[in-house]
Image (cartoon, rainbow, N blue to C red):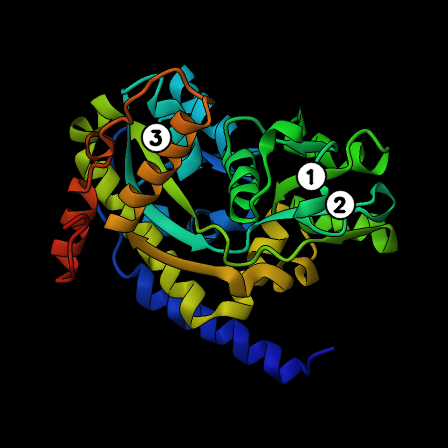
Amino acid sequence: MRPIGFGLISLLAVGLYLLIVMGNPKPVFSAPLTIAVSSTPLSSPFILADKYGLFKKQGLEVQIKLYHGGHRCFEALMSGEVELATSSESVAMYNAFKRNDFSLIATFVTSDNDVKLTARRNAGIESLEDVAGHRVGMIKASASEYFFHSALMLHGVEPSGIIPVYLPPEQLGPALQNNEVDMVSLWEPYANQVAQSLKDEGFQLSTKGLYRLSFNLMAKRDDVQAKHSVHTALLKALEDAIELIQNQPDEARAAVSDYLKIPASEIDSYWPDYHFHLTLDKTLQLDLLSQAHWAISSGYVEQLVAPDFRDFIDDTALNALHGQMGGPGGTP
């Protein structure tokens, strides 16, 4: 247990930081804002902005709705359940082949070790070269599916010999435990939870650095201009939350742990892999295009030409925020 003095100092530090950040409240926007947020620590900026009143500081009334996965957040956005959503770039790529009525307005975190491959030892899999003929659980049209196929390509394994099993993220762990699949491609916190539940009967393959996942804030395209000032204010709240993560990492992790009901020890194990920052750089465009080329060449989609992802990235709100802060803009 940490000494009481240290805890008091930490609380005082957070309190002082929030007093500085909060300052004088901004004018209140008239309409409340509902955001679909994936229930993962990747969403920490939204969680902290909600928990510490940073949205209210910007005059925003925000309702956070948690979903299991960015693919479900995207569905909620498109169905009109919410006005904004968080999602991986892979979900954006898959859906860009089907529709063009959404925009990515900011990337708020990246990680090269969030999606992991977990296998049962008794399945006879020691490396990706052994996965042919086995059942692999994954989430369709998500970072889970793209990551798995990327790993196959990098190891020279033909995907035709794989038996894909598509399940929701919360069902993949039980499926692996019950021998319904032999391996799963799954993001945190599920990946860590699955590995812990299997104990010595399971293991995770070494895949760090194989894939750069980004989590992005998405809006309906028609709302980008109509709600420009709202989006800019929201990004300012996220910027303040990211600053809190950087200045008070221990307290930020504890707050996220409490919000998502995930043990702090679990979050500690993958928190160092997260790079929280607000951006819309060329890397996002390149990642989307690379993934789209895979989708075309693999026959995953019927189209023969990739979408022009420049049409799906809108940096007006981010540029407005950086203009206010005197920093760099979004996409060059």
Measure the alpha-carbon separation of dots 2 and 1: 7 Å
Tell me how many marks there are: 3
- Camera sees residue 261: no
Residue 29 figure quarter? top left
Which circle marks residue 184 in the picture?
1
Q: Are marks 2 and 1 in contact (CB under 8 Å)?
A: yes
Residue 59 figure quarter? top left
Q: Which residue is mark 3?
A: 32
Q: Residue 101: x and y, percent?
A: 27, 20
Measure the alpha-carbon separation of dots 3 and 1: 38 Å
| 248 w.r.t. 51: above or below | below
User: Which residue corresponds to the image point at 16% horizontal and 62% vertical from the top-left?
Assistant: 327
Q: Which residue is mark 2?
A: 119
Label 3: state its secondary structure. Answer: loop
Q: Earlier in the sequence, mark 3 or mark 1?
A: 3
Q: Earlier in the sequence, mark 2 or mark 1?
A: 2
Name the residue type under label 2: Ala
User: Which residue corresponds to the image point at 32% horizontal and 68% vertical from the top-left?
Assistant: 20
Label 2: state its secondary structure. Answer: strand
- Say which of 8 and 277 sits in front: 277
- Local crowd at mark 3 within 10 Å, few (<14), some, or many (≥20)? few
Q: Residue 260: x and y, percent?
A: 61, 46
